[in-house]
Image (spheres, rainbow, N blue to C red):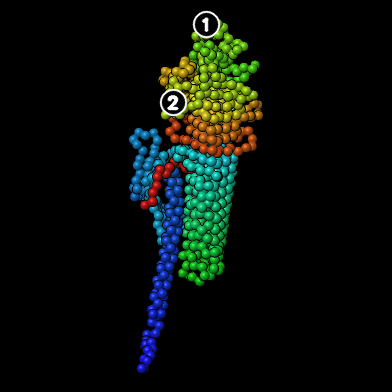
Amino acid sequence: MHRMIRYPRRMPGRQRGMATILIVVLVGMALTVTALGVVHAVRGTQEKQAAMHASTHAQAGAWAGLEIFRSYLEQLDETALGALLANNQIDMQVGTSTLQAKIVSNLPPASGATEKRYTVTANIRNQDNAARATSTIQAVFAVVAGANAAKPHEPWTDVLNIYSDLNMTGGIDVKGGNAAKFNVDGNATLNNASITGIKTLRATGDINIGSAIAVEELFANGNIALGGSATALKASAVGNVNINSGGTQGAIFANGDILISNGSVGTANALGAINASSGGSHGTFTAGKTINISNGTTATANAVGNITASGFPIIRAMNSQADVFCASVNWNNFNSIRAGRATFNCPVAPAKISAPTAVTVLLMTPLQPFSLPKPNVDAYELKDSANYVFEFRNGQIQVGVKNVNGIADGSYRIGRIKQGGDKWGYLCAALDGGGFCRDECSTVVSGTCTGPGMATLRRLTRGNSENAQSITFNNGTWRLEGNSPADTTPPQGTPNEAVVVAPGALWFEGNVELSNGKFRNSILATGNIASSSHRTFAINFAGYANICTSTFYAPLFPTNFCDTAAQQLKPNALGNIALLAGGFVGNTFSGGNINLGASSKIYGSVIAGNLLQTGGDTMINGQVTAASQGGAGSNNWSGRTTIDLRNLPSGYDPGDIPDMGGGTQPCQTDCDPSADSPSGQISQAKLLWSRYL
């Protein structure tokens, strides 16, 4: 039997490896698709970044234009403001760039209004042709005609005047819009803090700002340094400006140099040099000396001296009256180069490079330093104007009373009486050995003093209980203490409300410590003032009803403040003061420090003859002066401090403070911030709101 042997059938040769080839082809196609996807994603990202840079730069230029337009409005008088009509266009020059402001509407003041306030709506447009981006901001301004016209000016007129270094940390909140102006005769440091609401900060020394603090306008006789993510719409320094902030700045001016190592800048104008190493987007740089740019995007660089590009920055246009040095012969991140002398290390691009050629660079007007008129703070000068004068004589509290209804002028002691129990705080001529009013309590019937004078005895003060001593003196310091105050709406309260001392002006020889209680007094001390957990209302802030019709201490009220016939307060500058500390004995100043501790709320002007310190939870509803008459030291504001300048009552005039002799008041020259502007500020323009269109 034959066995059949079968062999595997062999495939035709032309089909060998077909599956392998197919797999290779499919993998190749997949890789191609992936590569194309990566290229598309990279290109999309690049386009987004380019668009973002272009948009950021255009927006920075628009914001710079907004500030320029606001400054323009402040240079117009009432006639010129009234002549602004819808569709009027104002061209603004920023370096070699032109921005437009188109008037949308101009609402005139209301008929019969005493304040000539115009409401101007305008569209500010910045078109960056090189970046192919446009940004338009619609802004509404409130413009008060003639609000800043030159006039005699006393050193109390500005809101917050600090005459030595100011350090602000913690949570500082300034409420009040245009009124939020700080003047510092020294250095100002704002850092490690959440600080909001400051419109203008001027310093005769240096300004240093960090954290995420935003200030609308800065001016320093020295240098300005911005770090963290701090921002300023406008910053001007007689010295140098150093920007190491990640924020976006507006318009920067310096008589010296400008250094930009972080963030973005709308415009930079220096009489010295400009050095930019930031990767941000910048507008126009104009320098009286050289410009060096090593990073980021810059629209225009104008320099009297050389312009140097290093690294591979983007500089749309370079205009130098001297030489231009390019980053490399392969560097082409520019649209035009114009040099008065020559170019070096630049690519061959005759269509974009002109050298030598005529170049003219227009520089800013040099900034002029400002001086802060200094007041004179002296509590001794106000002693005769006070209603109650507190002195410690012969081991006892002595109170001088003057101009108070219901009690004769004269010198009194504070004693207690028996009236259903012991009660302390009454004004009497003399005390017995137990601290009781001697004559009035010379006889006591059924636990009640019935001696001569009881019918006319007046109570001056009440503590946290009927017999508590609410005013004490120990080792040079007066301590005033009542019940823990309760906040009310309105904060002034009502005439029948319990307060620690009868309404009126209080004068203390020595230091004062306010601890607990509500006070409707103007409080003056020849030494220092410290406080916690209290509410103090200046007389003019408290108002007529609370000062002149108080039922708690009836019939006492200060006749030098109360016009009962007209039922209104008499004009009296002393009533604008809530707290004042410090005074001169001969030529020697002593005291003058005010330290506001936790839960202190003050309504009225706070005037420290030397330094003002804040901490805890502090609120000041009014203006502040720290005159630095006591020598070295700095004002340290920390904790949670609020300066509220809104809704101040009509009777409170913080610019009207009694003359205390000496000093430099009234100031006749170099007193107004508008003096810093070459053209002068006539009106006052406030930005109400804005939006991108």
Viewer-proximal residue, 217 or 417? Answer: 417
The amino acid at mark 1 is Val
Count the marks: how many? 2
Above or below, 7 relative to 529: below
Q: Residues within 10 Å of mark 2 (few under 14, many from 20)?
A: some
Q: Secondary structure at mark 1?
A: strand
The amino acid at mark 2 is Gly
Q: Secondary structure at mark 2?
A: loop
Q: Residue at x 45, y 19 (%)?
A: 550
Rounded to the nearest whole Å, what is the CA distance between mark 1 and mark 2? 37 Å
Horizontal and vertical percent position of residue 71: 45, 46
Can you identify the residue that label 1 sits on? 445
Can you identify the residue that label 2 sits on? 493
Horizontal and vertical percent position of residue 266: 48, 53
Which label belongs to residue 550? none
Horizontal and vertical percent position of residue 391: 60, 20
Q: Residue at x 54, y 38 (%)?
A: 639
Which comes before the other along the chain, label 1 or label 2? 1
Q: Residue at x 60, y 11 (%)?
A: 432
